[in-house]
Amino acid sequence: MLPIGLIRLSPPRLTSLQSIFRYRSYTTTGAQIQETYDVVIVGGGPAGLSLASALRSSSITKNLRVALVEGMNLEPSKNWKAVPGTYSNRVSSLTPGSVGFLADIGAWKYIQKERVQPYHAMKVWDGVSGSKINFNSSLQESASTIAYMCENTNLVSGLLSYLDDMGGIDILDQSRLEKIQFGEDKGGLDLRTWPILRTSSGKNLAARLLVGADGANSPVRIFAEIETRGWDYGRHGVVATLKLDSKRPMSETMSTAYQRFLPTGPVAMLPLPGDYASLVWSTTPQNAALLKTLSPKDFSAMVNAAFRLSHIDLEYLFGSKNAGLADEIEWRESVTTTDATLMPTRVAGVQENTVASFPLKMRHADSYIAERIALIGDAAHSIHPLAGQGLNQGLGDVRSLIKAVESAVQNGQDIGSELSLEPYLSEQYLKNHVMLGVVDKLHKLYGTSLKPVVAARSLGLDTVNAFDGLKSLIMGQAAGR
């Protein structure tokens, strides 16, 4: 059943000639079409804004009429003024491939670079066996950086500023999508296969190509009747902005990402400029709820413990639910031997109001396209954050979709036809499906402390760590090269 407001009426009987083609016909409720666009993008997040920017920057697509519809007010994001010494808890790890794409379309220069932190090494280890793997950018001949940590607000603000300077895109913010339906043939332009969007601002938009960049619960995907497959992980991701101990040497911590796999989920500390870091801790809903109630002192102590104490100690600490965890953790650390070469700088504090959590899930749409519809980003797929690939997959979608639209324009094709959109589906679907599968299997592989499984995965991790060529190949794939 479709949600209220997403209307799909039964198609009329088609002639025998029409039935040769995969053709659908729908009627409207008689709403007057006010404006016609080549491309309408629903969603003003990084994926949607990147697509709008790419369409505007391309010499082939710059003359297309494009609108972006977003329910939120984008003005605060465009005029965002960062407060020195504070960082958002919504941070993405952008691969060199993603940054290269943003640079190619001209948007990267609008990002506040002083708030972007590149890292050149990554240390990953098994929290049960201690087996480890170290990645270093020196393994890559063509790159000196593994990834760039960038706040989502910084990226959104930069993209909006770029679009503001470029012009040519109708940004309809504070316009909630109320209804999508198909048009009709009134003797002029045949709109029977064109999606018609009605917004809360009273506008009716006809889209030659409608792009859903509207998140995991995408109304565009629902309207297109594209199903999704997947499951919830029964885990929550806890995020926070951490203040590191500035009395310790910071050079390595600033250029290194750390990740430890625990039976309840991986915990990662990712570098931000100066003595700050971003935390992403995947754990059970009960543990996440407890972490959000802790004092800054106890929370900082628990993060330090997550990288240093055994998974058995951590299980006890989460189960004790006692105040004053910091003292208990200090004692346990004093009698625990750790590999100092793996450990990140200690956490000294947590930025106020940055501790939050969200449920983790894996979803993949059955298709990314339908007639006059394309899906990108979270509307098409949702991935576990352990590999930091969510936004990179979305930007990969944008890069691929732009190529398909450019090809259609150059060859005089209808940019909204499934024939024109097929190259996007062919290029991205399998690539994303493989990444989703790999990350899902890693989550399950490391989500147990059973001895045979631990022994097998530890052997595999140690083996990969011994071969620089194999690590270089893995890094190249993850970096989008």
Image (tube, rainbow, N blue to C red):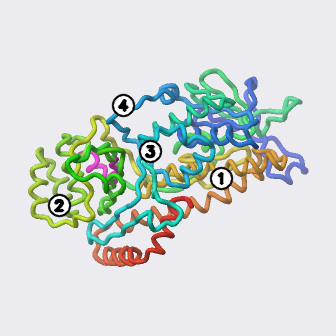
> Is residue 236 visible from the viewing direction of this image?
no
For mark 2, what is the residue?
Answer: 313
The secondary element bearing badge 3 is classed as strand
Closer-to-camera residue (54/166): 166
Kind of residue at disc 1: Ser
Which residue is tagged 3? 150
Q: Which residues are magenta?
A: 278-290
**Contact flag, marks 3 and 1 (Cβ < 8 Å):** no
Mark 2 vs 1, N-terminal side: 2
**Which comes sooner in the sequence, label 1 or label 4?**
4
Q: Residues within 10 Å of mark 1 (few under 14, many from 20)?
A: some
Instruction: Please give the name of the residue rendered at 38% of the width and 38% of the height, measured from the top-left corner.
Output: 88
- Is 4 placed above or below 340 here? above
Residue 279 shown in magenta: yes
In the drawing, what numbered circle is on residue 319? none
Q: Position of residue 196 (x, y in %)?
A: 71, 32
Which residue carries the number 1 mark? Answer: 400
Residue of label 4: 83
Q: Earlier in the sequence, mark 3 or mark 4?
A: 4
Amino acid type shown at disc 4: Val
Q: Does the rendering let one see residue 412?
A: yes
